[in-house]
Amino acid sequence: MKKTISILISALIMCTSFAGCSAKKETVTTDGSTSMEKVIGVLGETFEADTGITVTYNPTGSGSGIKAVAAGTCDIGLSSRMLKDEEKSQGLSETILAYDGIAIIVNPENPVDDLDVETIAKIYTGEIANWSEVGGNDSEIVLIGREAGSGTRDGFESITGTEDKCAYRQELTSTGDVITTVSQNPDAIGYASVASVKDTVRAVKVGGVAATEATIKDGSYVIQRPFVLVTKTDTKLSGSAQKFFDYITSEKARDSISSAGVVAAN
Amino acid sequence: MKKNKIVERAVHGVFLILGLLTLGCVLLITVYLIISGIPAIKEIGLFDFLFGTRWASTAEEPSYGILPFILTSIYGTAGAIVIGVPIGFFSAVYLSKFAAPKIKGFMENAVSLLAGIPSVVYGLVGMLVLVPGIRTLFDIPDGASLAAAIIVLAIMILPSIIKVSMTALEAVPKEYEDASLALGATPVETCFRVSVPAAKSGIAAAVVLGVGRAIGEAMAVMMVSGNVPNMPSLFQSVRFLTTAVASEMSYSSGLQQQALFSIALVLFLFIMLINAVLNFFLKKENC
């Protein structure tokens, strides 16, 4: 008898928790690039403070975000790369929200301070395999990268022209893992969003230019990529989603966007 | 009387539904995996898929060979068994036959705790301690490797091996041991000549269970193995079947995603095979 009661109680609890979900507030759902977590988080907070509309964010990755918009399971997709032609032909359109610089990071113990894009490409393709060839210690370079399909990897490889040629030692699945690994290994080199670089690693200059907001915006820091909002071309956004879209692409959002460490496009 | 019967029926019904729910989940997953795993295999070709040595899913000319993943999973699991089974087996023998009750109680708790640690914690400790450790110890450029994964897996399968072996050893009838001792055998002789042979199918089941855990682990392995689709080698960065699915799934599209489902299907078949072997040993024990 006791068992029946406990089963009934747990069933009741389940019912109420489902009911809790279905009580709907006005929300905007976003889904996509893990690199955009910070910027969307900040924008969502300020937008909610202004309008009371909640913005949810699901960090699934650019590819999943684009798919989610196409499938209609979220309002706005977030992608840290431009859409591919096959994706555009599915009736999706892109709006650039901001530019993100990709920092080339090394261990703080590493004396190398400046590399140009060509050298970085040579390092990542394995042509330069020892730090001494670029003015560092005599030790093998350990290449840390991201997994195939990652927006950061796609951005890095397309900018440096090393698509499918990188001889990675490790392919990690998050920016945090890359930073941790580089901070643990004095011979490692990696890449990560400028916004997420911490003190445990050091960002090198690229062709003499440090990655800062000004250099990313004026294009002199060359390793950078767009943060893109993906929407359906022929379906109108819901009222609240349209409001959010207008807000984040307006000048008002510029401060919030730069507080997230990236450079606003508008 | 009648009321009791109704309650009885209702409870019966609830249990039946809950049981069917489990069955439904298994069926759903199996059918889904088969349906979503077959198309990519068809497109790539079974031979090229299973025995291709190059995996480059996002390349200009993509190539989907999963032999490196299959071999890595097999080598990794075998390595974990080679290290984990002796440790686990002798621990189980010690705990069930020789340890003082106090030590036994304490150790059993420790083993349970080891089983309860989430795999991401194993991965994190491995990433921060084991990987740099291997790097300095073996003087290689980077420590994330098959070796690191094997060590993490060996530790992770210890609890299941110890617990299942212990249960099997403790189930050996005391009369067997008493008889052996009465005939003049020492406790150690009794243990290895009488108790262990009597419990052998249970111990075999423990090993198979360990294999199942090791081959299915993703998170911890992903954090220490480097995830590059190389052919397996002890101090190279490698990618397992599980991590191949987990690391690319979030950004995948098109044939790449379908191929990941196919990898999952291969992994599923491996695990089915292991379960079949496990059932075989367990049935043998019951007879």
Image: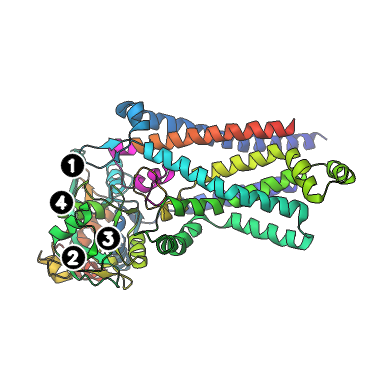
Residue A226 appears in the rendering: no
**Above-or-below relation of B68 to A125:** above
The label nearer to you, 1 versus 2, is 2
**Above-or-below relation of B279 to A40:** above
**Same chain letter for marks 4 and 1:** yes
Q: Mark 2 points at which residue?
A: A134
Q: Which of A251 and B81 is in front in this view?
A: B81
The label nearer to you, 4 versus 3, is 3
Q: Mark 1 points at which residue?
A: A88
Task: Give the percent coordinates (x, y) of residue A209.
Answer: 13, 69
Query: Dot 4: within a 10 Å radius of its alpha carbon, few (fewer than 14), some, or many (20 or more) residues?
Result: some
Task: Give the percent coordinates (x, y) of residue B40.
Answer: 33, 31
Marks 3/1 in contact by CB < 8 Å: the verdict is: no
Type of amino acid at the residue the image marks with label 1: Lys
User: Circle 4 sits in a helix, a strand or a loop, which is it?
Assistant: loop
Q: Mark 4 points at which residue?
A: A161
Type of amino acid at the residue the image marks with label 3: Ile
